[in-house]
Amino acid sequence: MTYRGRFAPSPTGPLHAGSLVSALASFLDARARGGSWIVRIEDVDAPRTVPGAADDILATLAHFGMHSDETPVWQSERGAAYQAAFERLQAAGFIYPCGCTRREIADSLVHAHARHATLAYPGTCRNGLHGKPARAWRLRVPDGDAARISFVDRWQGPQTQDLATDVGDFALKRADGLWAYQLAVVVDDADADITHVVRGADLLDSTARQVYLQQCLGVPTPLYLHVPVVNNGIGEKLSKQTGAAPLDRHAPLDALVEAARHLGIEASADTLDAFYRAATAEWAKRFGR
C-alpha cells in the first residue's frame, strides 16, 4: 500500500496550538511511512469561511516546515464531484428529501442530544414529506445489527457506534443548499486515494458515519488515528470559538516541541530539520514505519 495522508483545516481563522497538533501528527505519520502528505482546505461551509484564512494557514504551515507534497485541494472547487456522488446515492435509493427544521427534530425527540451540532434524526420524513417542502437530503442508515459500525482506531483502539440510535439518518445536503461535511470528506478522501486519516479526537464521532457512507459509495475505508485534543485552562477544547491564540510564526520550534509533547513525543532540537528527524523517528517507534 502506498501511504497517502492529509491535513484538512477549515479556513475559519488562523492555525492555533490545537490545530498544530493535528497537523504535526498527520505530517509525522506520513513521513514515518515514507508517504505523501496533502493539504486540503475544507471551505465547503462558505458562511464560516474567513477571507484570507486559507492563505494564512498555508503560509503558517510553510513557516513551520510543513509543505503539501501535492497542490493543495480546495473543497469549494469540487462541487461537481459531490454532485456526482450524490446522484449515485440517489439512484441507488440510499437518500431521501427531508422537510424537517432543527426545532421540529428536537421537539419530536423524547431525549434529544447533540452530536457535532446535529440532533439524532428520528426518521420523520423516511416515508414522505407529509406535505412539507424538501429542505435537506438525508442518507438512510440501516436498522438493527447492520447499524452498528465498528473500526479500530490506531490511537483510541476498537470503536463501535450504532448509527440508528446515536445519529439517525444524517444530512448529505443541507437546507441552505451546501454540501454536508460528511459527504465532502468521504468523496475527497476517496478521490485523493487517502489511505490513512490522522486527525483530532473531536472528529472521532463522525468516523462511523463516514465508514458507512464509504460502504454505500463502494470506496475504500482508510485507516484512522484520532489524537487527543488540546484543551484550554478551563477544560474546553482549544478552538477559535474558545479564544485560541494564533500560532507565532517567529517561534515555530517552541510550538512544535510543545505539540510533540502533547502527542507523547520528546523531540527537542535546534533546527526544524533536526526536530522533524527526531520526531519522525519517535513516531515510527510508536506507530510503525
Image (cartoon, rainbow, N blue to C red):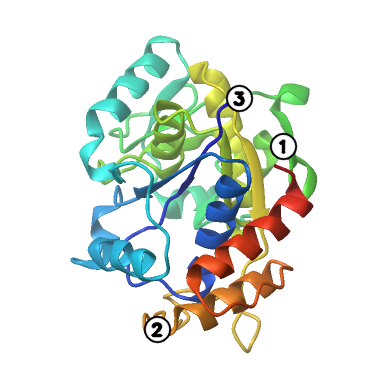
x, y (%) of residue 178?
Answer: 28, 43
Q: CA distance from mark 3 to mark 1?
A: 30 Å
Residue on which the image places disc 3: 1
Q: Looking at the image, which residue is at 45% across and 13% down?
A: 93
Residue on which the image places disc 1: 162
Residue 56's mark?
A: none
Q: Looking at the image, which residue is at 53% across and 27% down?
A: 213
- Is residue 59 visible to the viewer in this orientation of the structure? yes
Amino acid type at circle 3 is Met
Amino acid type at circle 2 is Asp
x, y (%) of residue 114?
Answer: 58, 57
Residue 178 to residue 16: above or below: above
Q: Looking at the image, which residue is at 25% across and 35% down?
A: 78
Q: CA distance from mark 3 to mark 2?
A: 37 Å
Crowding at dot 2, Cα within 10 Å, few <14 / some 14-19 / many 20+, comes out as some
Q: CA distance from mark 2 to mark 1?
A: 41 Å
Counting residues from the N terminus, which is met first, the one under dot 3 or under dot 1? 3
Quarter the C terminus occupies: top right
In terms of secondary structure, where does tag 1 sit? strand
Quarter the N terminus occupies: top right
Observer-side mark, 3 or 1, equals 3
In terms of secondary structure, where does tag 3 sit? loop
Counting residues from the N terminus, which is met first, the one under dot 3 or under dot 2? 3
Crowding at dot 3, Cα within 10 Å, few <14 / some 14-19 / many 20+, comes out as few
Residue 248's mark?
A: 2
Crowding at dot 1, Cα within 10 Å, few <14 / some 14-19 / many 20+, comes out as many
User: Could you say which is closer to the camera, residue 176 or residue 31?
Assistant: 31
Q: Looking at the image, which residue is at 61% across and 79% down?
A: 258
The residue sitting at the right extreme is: 158
